[in-house]
Image (cartoon, rainbow, N blue to C red):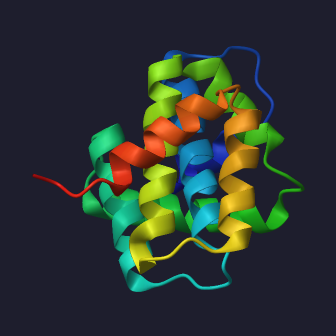
Amino acid sequence: MLEKLLQLLAPRQTDSAVDREERLRLATCIVLLEVAGADNEFSPAECQLIIDSLRTRFDLLQEEAEELIEVAQERRQEASGLWKYTNQINQSCSVEEKVGIIEEVWRVIYADGSLDGHEDYLVHKLADLMNLTHPQLIEAKMRVSRPKA
C-alpha cells in the first residue's frame, strides 16, 4: 500500500477510479491529521480515532490505516496548505460525504474533550474549503457532540 500511495504523486496519463479512491483516502487522512495537530498535541486517543475512522470509511485493515497515516504525515509536512487536499475531497465526494468527513473532524477535535481556538478556526476553514455552509458545519458538530441515547 505504501508504494501505491507514493505512486499517486507521480504524473500519469490515466486517472482510474482506484487512483481517485487512493487520493481521497490520503486527502481525508491529511485533513484529520491536520486537525489533530491543530492544538499542538497528537494524543493516542486522537490517533486511534483517526485509524478507526479510516478503517470504517474506506474499509481498511488496521495495518493499512496505520500505513496511510505514516504516508499522510510525510505529505502533510511537505504540503503548503490544505486546498490541494480539500479540492480532492470536493472532486470525489457528494455533499453528504463531505459532511461525514466534517463529522469525523469534529470527533477528532473533541477526542480530548475540548475545543481549542486553533481547532475552531481550522474546522471553519475546512468547511469553507469543502464548500459546506455554516449550518451544515454546526449541524455536523451537534450530531457529534450530542450525548448518545
At 47% from the left and 84% from the top, the residue drawn is: 43
Residue at 54% of width from left, 53% of height from top?
29
In the displayed orientation, state which residue is furthest to the left.
Answer: 149
Q: Residue furthest right?
A: 80
- Between residue 103 and residue 59, name the one nearer to us: 103
| Residue 1 appears anywhere in the view | no
Give the residue displayed 25% in from the left and 54% down from the top: 61
x and y percent of residue 62 in the render? 27, 62
On the rendered structure, is 19 left or right of 113? Answer: right
Task: State the image quarter where residue 86 is shown.
Answer: top right
Is 96 on the left or on the right of 88, as rendered? left
Residue found 65% across the figure and 52% down from its top: 123
Please tell me in which quadrant of the rendered image residue 19 appears.
Answer: top right
Location of residue 67 with respect to 40 vertically, above or below = above
Instruction: Name the residue nearer the viewer: 129 or 28.
Output: 129
Q: Is residue 90 visible?
A: yes
Relative horizontal placement of residue 139, taking residue 125 as reference (left or right): left
Q: How many marks?
A: 0
Residue 51, image x, y percentages:
36, 62
Q: Is residue 17 above or below residue 143?
A: above
Q: Is residue 67 left or right of residue 63?
A: right
Q: Looking at the picture, how far across and down is residue 24, in whole percent?
A: 56, 35
Give x and y (percent) for residue 148: 16, 54
